[in-house]
Image (cartoon, helix red, strand yellow):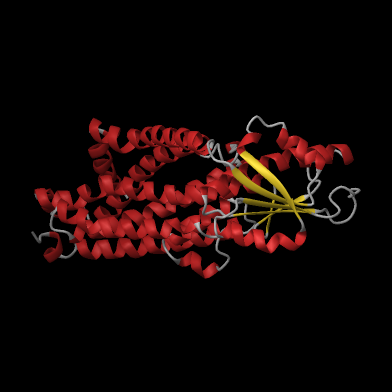
Amino acid sequence: MKNILTIFKKEWDRVIKDKRLVLTVMLMPGLMIFLIYTFIGTALQNTMNQDIYQVAIVNPQLEFKNIYDQDANSDTFYVIAIDSTQVAEYETDIDNANWDLLIQFADNIDTYDGTGTKPDVQIYYNPNEIASTTIYGTFANYLMVYRSTLSYDLYGDTTYFNYVQNGTPLDQNGIAGTMMASLLPMLIIMFLFSGAMAIGPESIAGEKERGTIATLLVTPVKRREIAIGKIFALSVLTLISATSSFIGIIASLPKLLQSTSNIDISMYTVWDFSQILLILFSTVFVIVGVISIISAYAKSLKEASSMIVPIYILTILVSISSMFGNGANTNFYMYLLPIYNSVQALTAIFTFDTNALTYLLITIGANLVYLTFFVIILNRMFNSEKIMFNK
């Protein structure tokens, strides 16, 4: 254990004592993300305000109309009333980007007396279209106000009716959570990988290229301890870099999504953020393990970097699955797949999935198994003179 800590300290000092690495790897990611996303959010807001959105409502309610009519931005959309026989037609138009939003109030929305099954308000939009997503967020906020008004008038709570978005029931937090889940898992995984790429190859491939790895390998320290020490040091450093990026994302996301939803980070509890942190930890081990193996195999730092790029691209392709799914994957076996399991587990947390804890435990367990596997492989590579001294 002492030798592992020695290797850990060596890798830690290599990064921490280099002011340029501290700036570029730990501080700049979060700052740049915050500045860039804030700028993009402002630009999108200015652009979207110029659009005229189309909204169709089945069984429109006067009180609801009074709410959106009072909005200063009510001139950016127009609303028409349709009957229930036209619902399928307008849903098709929304799918084809010819219409933006459809809201269908239940027939008993204005006669519900607070007993029995609560009425539904069906909301249909196209999450792949910016205009549709934008006006959906706007009218979701109007519906929150409308529900609160009806609820307090009737029996003093805020759940007069149920939200049903594209066929999936949502609560008030679920609407904002869906927005969070469409972006954050992808961004978190991307920045985890980019942070590991910035410091990982230098730790092994860089030392091979300079010849310093040979000196380390002839010391009394077991090569297994060297492998474990490097993986843990790189994991902690990568997690710090990812945390910086995560803070930047959280700080800038409300500005980025202000035109589609009112994001309130306080809807997530300390336990939610603790689960996210656990997923980050376990995912970092997987990413660092892969990068360490590639670095040990490569002959030079340049070769290691070029070999890692395709893996990075594949990771991005896997991580964008959060943008196109309807919540977290319900197949437990899918949480055995590296990277994909982390993306789906994060999606479950952000959308308040009732099975989020189960997905979390499966994901962490699977990632720890992968970590063990990677350590074994890296140890064997360190014991191979042909690999470690190949130039």
State which quarter of the image contains the C terminus: bottom left
Would residue 219 be visible to someone looking at this image? no
Q: How many marks?
A: 0
Using the rendered view, name the quadrant where residue 122 is placed. Answer: bottom right
Residue 288 located left or right of residue 164:
left
Residue 68 located left or right of residue 15:
right
Residue 110 located left or right of residue 194:
right
Using the rendered view, name the quadrant where residue 104 is placed. Answer: bottom right
* 156 vs 213: above or below: above
Could you say where residue 217 lies in the image, as x and y percent from the top left?
15, 54
Could you say where residue 323 lies in the image, as x and y percent from the top left?
49, 55
Q: Residue at x 38, y 44 (%)?
A: 239
* 113 vs 249: above or below: below
Could you say where residue 286 lies in the image, as x and y percent from the top left?
37, 57
Would residue 5 be visible to someone looking at this image? yes
Q: Nearer the viewer, residue 245 or 131?
A: 131
Residue 316 located left or right of residue 388:
right
Q: Nearer the viewer, residue 257 or 288?
A: 257
Q: Residue at x 67, y 40 (%)?
A: 141
Using the rendered view, name the quadrant where residue 138 is placed. Answer: top right
Could you say where residue 113 lies in the image, as x and y percent from the top left?
91, 48
Q: Residue at x 58, y 38 (%)?
A: 263
Q: Residue at x 41, y 62 (%)?
A: 338
